[in-house]
Amino acid sequence: MAFQHRDNGMPDSAFFYFNKAKDIFLQHHDNLGTAKCLLNMAIIATDRGDNFGSQEMSLNALRYFDQKDADQFIYICSNYNNLGRATQNLLDYKRAIKFYELAIEFSRDSSTILINQNNKANVLNAMKSYKEAIVLYSSILKTTRNNNREYARVLTNISYTKWLQNFSYDARPDYLKALKIRIADNDLFGQNSSYSHLAQYFAKKDPDSAMMFARKHLQVAKILNSPDDQLSALQELVTLSPASETKSYFERYRILDDSLQVARWKAKNQFALIRFETEKHKADFQKSQAENAEKKNRILIGYFIVVALVLSLLSVYLWFRKRNRLLRQEKELEVKNTELKYVKKIHDRVANKVYHLMSEVENIPNLKRDLLLDKLEALYNTSRDISYENKEPTSEGNYAAQLSGMLQSYSSASTEVLIVGNDEEVWIGINDTAKDELFIVMQELMTNMKRHSQAQMVVIKFLRDDYCITVLYTDNGIGMADAGRNNGLKNTENRINGIHGTITFESILEKGLDITISFPIA
């Protein structure tokens, strides 16, 4: 039933039945059957965007495969390939390469080897290791001349890599050659790739040609019913189209992106719920067994309770005397900490937001009265609830958009704010606490800029590598005489330290201010 649903394009139902089959295989101690079910569940999860869940299931499948049994190599290869895909989607390129190398090690036919080698080369390309990628693509190209689809794919990839390495490289002949092969072979997936690469190549050289290929890209993506490729094509059209068409393409992009994200979240939640219910049934069965064993031991435990009670009473008496002394000391410290906590809350939740709202009123001439009242009511609710312990969220939904919106709100006729690199991919895997703290820190910096710097230009750049997030802030204002005397800036240092990061200030009077913030990803 699982395979039938999968072949009929019903991955959610297929996942459900693979999960049920897995449990039956486990009951019969059939390791290979269990591993194959986990592998298929993991592949479905990767296809639906649940990369973390996919990694967990593929790694669990490795426990049940026998890596000494050559008959299982085809499944083990597929499992490592899926681990490579999921890990690559999460931008963990070094581990993705290791998984693709393991997939190559367990490959037993030339076509599978070529697929995994091509995947490895794609990761090297993403890591900007262009020379290594070109060497690997070249070796693949020599073995694919009798396979039109593979030859066209590798020819496109190697030309794209050479173009990334040197933008003056003329990739057009190879791109068009690959496209011709794909059209003749009716390879829609290949045509989709070719049109995307050609649109990107002509973007600056020949905008009209770029527009033509971008439209073809969108047309083929619709035929394939591929939301991700449609988003890519719409993004190209938003960049390339004239102003009169940009809004239409952007609206289509936004609607499609929203629906795709909702579908993926539903799939993730559904997969998690199926697995949770299975584990719950197991836990209930184990609990029932434990209760039976507990009944047999109650009599014996009763004897020990009396002795333990006497010793406990004595211990409690001694502990109580010591605890009273500690409580008096802790109470005094708690009062001081409470005072500091509420001072910090008022500064972060009220003061900065008041100034933020003032900035919007100043910079938005036609700010609607109802919108202003809504913002004032939200500010009122925040100040009213300041004594509660609930945390005010700043990172729900699209964090990158919220952060950019807040930063751009400080832009005015006299101060231009430029934001570079704040894409949603930057924040994948970053915990909510770190994102919330950074949001408040950036709001504090922008408020200080607006109030004190007299800056005409502010540039904020976001960078991510394998280990950390780095934020580079610079403005051309009057600088700071002494950053250490500002309580708000002290709070920013404390917040960054709280997420194990660092913040440095470099100020030259009359020449501006540079701030570097860095904190670890995990």
Image (tube, grey):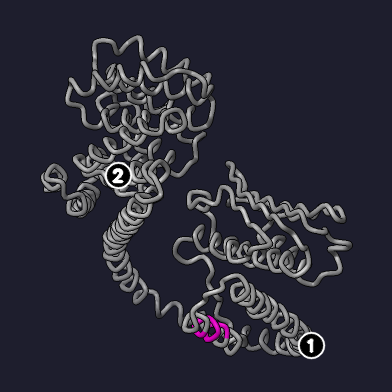
Please give the label number shown on residue 332.
Answer: 1
- The amino acid on which the numbered mark 1 sits, given as a three-letter code, is Glu
Q: Position of residue 269 (x, y in %)?
A: 32, 61
Q: Residue at x 40, y 12 (%)?
A: 139
Q: Position of residue 456 (x, y in %)?
A: 72, 57
Q: Nearer the viewer, mark 2 or mark 1?
A: 2
Q: Residue at x 66, y 87 (%)?
A: 316
Q: Main secondary structure of the magenta part?
A: helix
- First in sequence: mark 2 or mark 1? 2
Establish if 58 lies above or below 144.
below
Question: Which residue is labeled 2 in the image?
Answer: 230
Total numbered labels: 2
Q: Are marks 2 and 1 in contact (CB under 8 Å)?
A: no
Which span is picked out in magenta?
373-379
Question: In the rendered image, is residue 88 in sight?
Answer: yes
Residue type at mark 2 is Gln
Residue 441 falls inside the magenta stretch = no
- From the viewer's perspective, tell me whether residue 335 is left or right of residue 468: right
Label for residue 452? none
State left or right for residue 421 relative to residue 71: right
Please provide percent x and percent y for residue 367. Answer: 52, 76
State how far apart marks 2 and 1 are (Cα). 62 Å
| Residue beneath the point at 88% across and 63% down | 482
